[in-house]
Each structure stands twice: as structure tokens, then as C-alpha cells.
């Protein structure tokens, strides 16, 4: 009787492990944008746009400085 309970417990734990493994694989296959909350993703996009704007501004200043030195 005790061995039957142990076997059932073992099979239940194996089923749990397999289920977790399948869920993890599905999660890892998703894109980053699909797994992030919308608020976090919007913040990432905003920071990227701000960085591009700073880069453009810096390049403009650099080009103006180069043209003055000529």
C-alpha cells in the first residue's frame, strides 16, 4: 500500500516537472516585447528615442564645429 502511494507521488512530481519544463520552453521562445509588461516596454521605447535624439543633437553640434574649423 505504501509503495503505491510512493509511485503515485513520484508520477505526480514527474508530471509537474514536465509541465513546468514545457511552460518554460514556451516562455523562452517568446520575444522580449511579448513577455514584458506594456508599461516597461513603453519606457524602453521612450529611452531609446531619447538616446537617438541626444545622438542626433551631438552629431549636429559636431558637424557645426567641424564646419567652423574649415
Image (cartoon, rainbow, N blue to C red):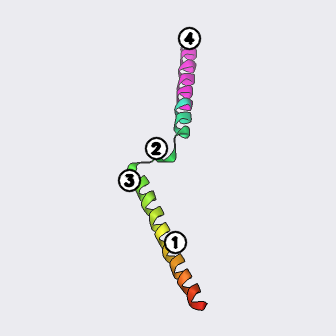
Q: Sequence-wise, which precedes: disc 1 or disc 4?
A: 4
Q: Which residue is mark 1?
A: 55
User: How packed is label 2: few (under 14 Cα within 10 Å), some, or many (20 or more)?
Assistant: few
Q: Which residue is mark 4?
A: 4
Circles 4 and 3 in contact, beta carbons < 8 Å:
no
Q: Residue furthest top?
A: 1
Cα distance in 3D space between marks 4 and 2 = 43 Å
Q: Nearer the viewer, residue 59 or 20?
A: 59
Q: Sequence-wise, which precedes: disc 2 or disc 1?
A: 2
Q: Sequence-wise, which precedes: disc 3 or disc 1?
A: 3
Q: Position of residue 37 (x, y in %)?
A: 41, 48
Foreground disc of the pair 2, 1:
1
Q: Residue furthest right?
A: 70
Magenta-drawn segment: 1-21
Question: Which image quarter is the N terminus in?
Answer: top right
Foreground disc of the pair 3, 1:
1
Q: Position of residue 8 (x, y in %)?
A: 54, 15
Asked if the magenta segment contains residue 53, the reply would be no
Cα distance in 3D space between marks 2 and 1 = 28 Å
How would you classify the magenta stretch by its main secondary structure? helix
Q: Residue at x 51, y 78 (%)?
A: 60
Where, by quadrant of the figure, is residue 15 drawn?
top right
Q: Which residue is mark 3?
A: 39
Where, by quadrant of the figure, is residue 47 drawn?
bottom left
Q: Which residue is mark 2?
A: 34
Q: Position of residue 22 (x, y in %)?
A: 55, 30
Q: Residue furthest left?
A: 39
Residue 36's place in the image compared with 60, above or below, is above
Residue 10's place in the image compared with 24, above or below, is above
User: How packed is label 1: few (under 14 Cα within 10 Å), some, or many (20 or more)?
Assistant: few
Mark 2 falls on what kind of element?
helix
Amino acid at each position: 500500500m505504501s509503495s503505491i502511494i510512493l509511485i503515485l507521488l513520484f508520477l505526480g512530481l514527474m508530471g509537474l516537472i514536465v509541465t513546468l519544463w514545457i511552460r518554460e520552453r514556451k516562455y523562452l521562445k517568446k520575444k522580449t516585447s511579448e513577455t514584458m509588461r506594456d508599461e516597461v516596454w513603453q519606457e524602453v521605447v521612450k529611452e531609446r528615442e531619447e538616446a537617438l535624439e541626444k545622438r542626433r543633437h551631438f552629431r549636429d553640434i559636431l558637424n557645426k564645429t567641424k564646419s567652423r574649423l574649415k
